Amino acid sequence: MTTKLDEKQYDLVNQYVGMLDTIEEALKYVEASFTASSKTEGDTVLSDVFMAIGQISESNPLLKEMFDGREDIQKVITEFDTVTNQALKLDGQLDNNAVRQSIVQEKLSPAFSAWKTTIEIELNPYLTH
């Protein structure tokens, strides 16, 4: 059973889910930039991904509070730590293209995609009217 969100809560959840789509598209671009010379903004986009992951992390306590008592949503929000842990593996590795590519393609991107699917299953019912 889903509880009806007020307008501010709805806007927050809607922006949150929208940000997830933006991060997913950005990660696809970064992955493509490793092999496509036309994708010259890979480093800039990766930097934007880090900032967006930080914004998601900052929003998670608000969502946890909003969905207090909904253990399923609480659990999935907490699982975002797996994504941040993968992103942290890039710390100090940004100058090493091979390592950066490996972490993004084999760890960060799959972890984010898996988490995004799970959180959307939990949050999308709140976005349908």
Image: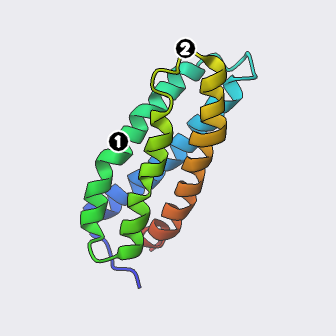
Of mark 2 and mark 1, the one earlier in the sequence is 1
Residue under pointer 2: 95
User: In this rendering, would 1 be left or right of 102?
Assistant: left
Nearer the observer: mark 2 or 1; the answer is: 2
For residue 40, say whether it is visible. yes
Q: Please tell me how crowded label 2 is: few (under 14), some (14-19), or many (20+) other residues with Cα within 10 Å.
A: few
Of residues 95 and 15, the one nearer the viewer is 95
User: In this rendering, would 3 be left or right of 24?
Assistant: left
Residue under pointer 1: 55
Judged from the image, the secondary structure of the residue bearing numbered disc 1 is helix
Q: Could you tell me which residue is drawn at 49 percent across and 49 percent down?
A: 20
Identify residue type, mark 1: Gln
Q: Quadrant of the N terminus?
A: bottom left
Q: Could you tell me which residue is drawn at 59 percent across and 22 percent down?
A: 42
The location of residue 30, given as percent across then percent down, is 62, 29
- Name above or below for residue 98 compared with residue 2: above
The location of residue 21, given as percent across then percent down, is 54, 48
Q: Quadrant of residue 6?
A: bottom left
- Name above or below for residue 38 compared with residue 69: above
Q: Which residue is outermost to the bottom?
A: 1
User: In this rendering, would 106 be left or right of 50?
Assistant: right
The location of residue 107, given as percent across then percent down, is 60, 41
Q: Could you tell me which residue is drawn at 66 percent across and 36 percent down?
A: 105
For residue 29, say whether it is visible. no
